[in-house]
Amino acid sequence: MVASKKSKNELLKEARLLELEGKTPDAIKIYSQVISKDPLLAGPYNRLMILYRKLKDYKKELAIIKQAIGAYEQDIKNDQQIWKKANSKSARLSLSLAKSIGLLNDKGLPVYEDPQILSWRKRLETVQKKIKTAPKPQKKKSVARTKK
């Protein structure tokens, strides 16, 4: 397959067309490829979440949500570490100030979250509820027949 030589935008267009044609499994594969190329691109995560919701595959939807949130949180941590190395004295002062005025949580992550991450967290809660309340397949009860 020549898909690896296509740009992210070309892959996204192709996946969207596959979706419109009803070829959901193929679209899912391409959105996953785009995520592997650029794990900080929100669009493919959102499309995968929608597709898995339509398929009622809540466990895969949950996994994608967690993957998306994890990628964004890791990027924030990486940015913080790079800045801390380049500005060690300012970083110490800024860190203590930010914690004292409540801008950072216990893990050192900003209390303010990107609206995209907030929407994913809300979706995470919804999917977790769906998984807990999903109807379990019922076993057929055998009915004893009596002879007349």
Image: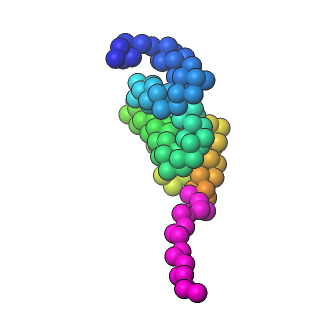
| Rendered view: 55 above or below 21 | below
**Is residue 136 among the parts visible in the rendering?**
yes
User: In this orientation, which residue lies closer to the viewer: 48 or 97?
Assistant: 48
| Rendered view: 39 above or below 118 | above
**Is residue 88 among the parts visible in the rendering?**
no
User: In this orientation, which residue lies closer to the viewer: 72 or 123?
Assistant: 123
Q: Is residue 146 magenta?
A: yes
Percent of width and height locating residue 67: 46, 42
Query: Please, which residue is most extreme toward the front here?
Result: 148
- Tell me where the magenta segment starts and ends, as one range: 131-148
In the rendered image, which quarter contains the C terminus? bottom right
Q: Is residue 137 magenta?
A: yes
**Horizontal placement of 108 versus 117: left or right?**
left
| Residue under the point 34% across and 17% down | 1
User: In this orientation, which residue lies closer to the viewer: 104 or 78?
Assistant: 78
Percent of width and height locating residue 9: 51, 15
Prevalent SS, magenta region: loop
| Residue under the point 64% across and 48% down | 122
Count of all numbered marks drawn on residues in the image = 0
Percent of width and height locating residue 86: 40, 29
Percent of width and height locating residue 143: 55, 78
User: In this orientation, which residue lies closer to the viewer: 40 or 135?
Assistant: 135
**Horizontal placement of 108 versus 37: left or right?**
right
| Residue under the point 53% across and 35% down | 48
Tell me which colouring the rendered structure shows. Answer: rainbow
